[in-house]
Image (cartoon, rainbow, N blue to C red):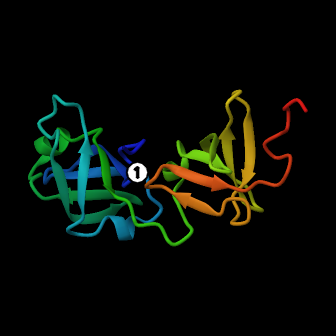
Amino acid sequence: MPRHSDRDRVRVGRLVKAHGLKGAIKLELYTDDPQRRFVPGAAFSLQVPESSPWHGRTLTLSELRWYNGAPVAFFEGVPDRTAAESLVRAILWTEADPPEDEAWYDHQLVGLDVLREGAKAGEVVRVEHLPGQDLLVVRVEDGTEVLVPFVKAIVPEVDVAAGRVTVTPPAGLFEIGEEE
């Protein structure tokens, strides 16, 4: 059973305001690559209240334009301002790209069990991105956090599907604070 239902999806934008009379909607982007994510034919699942007529539906982009530096989207089935206004505040989700070999999104790592010598040593609670290297922040059983360098020598295996990462830390990394 997956820990997070959104591991295979990524949030890419929010619809913020109807624009004009022909169904256009201004976007707030949550992606750094809108030219690739927002292409004609791209489909987005919607995060809207259950009471919304759009609940459970998807939107398909017909065109993305830029007005005064702001992205404005046109979607199939949104013919006018009234329909556009009914979508304001909707969050757009799309399928996540398959990660490159040895590359993962933070949301794929957070929540994974951390195994050391086959036993659970903790859980990844966040990823810190530092100039030299990334660190997995692992919460151990006593509630303290251990910073684990996210390098192949210390984290030889990441198995998102199984919900775990395997660590082979140097002596003392997980023992800090333990009585001897």
Residue 141 position in % (x across, y down): 67, 30
Q: In this view, does 41 lie to the left or right of 68?
A: left
Please determine whether, in this image, residue 98 is positioned above or below residue 174. Answer: below
Residue 42 position in % (x across, y down): 24, 65
Residue lying at the far right of the rendered structure? 180
Looking at the image, can residue 172 be seen?
Answer: yes
* Residue 96 figure quarter: bottom left
* Residue at the spot 9% in from the left edge and 54% down from the top edge: 77
* Residue at the spot 74% in from the left edge and 41% down from the top edge: 146
Please determine whether, in this image, residue 101 is positioned above or below residue 94. Answer: below
Q: Identity of the amino acid at label 1?
A: Arg
Looking at the image, can residue 68 be seen?
Answer: no
* Residue 85 figure quarter: top left
Residue annotated with mark 1:
7
Q: In this view, does 122 lie to the left or right of 162?
A: right
* Residue 12 figure quarter: bottom left
Residue 58 position in % (x across, y down): 18, 51
Label 1 secondary element: loop
Q: In this view, does 63 lie to the left or right of 94?
A: left
Q: Nearer the viewer, residue 154 or 23?
A: 154
Residue 82 position in % (x across, y down): 11, 41
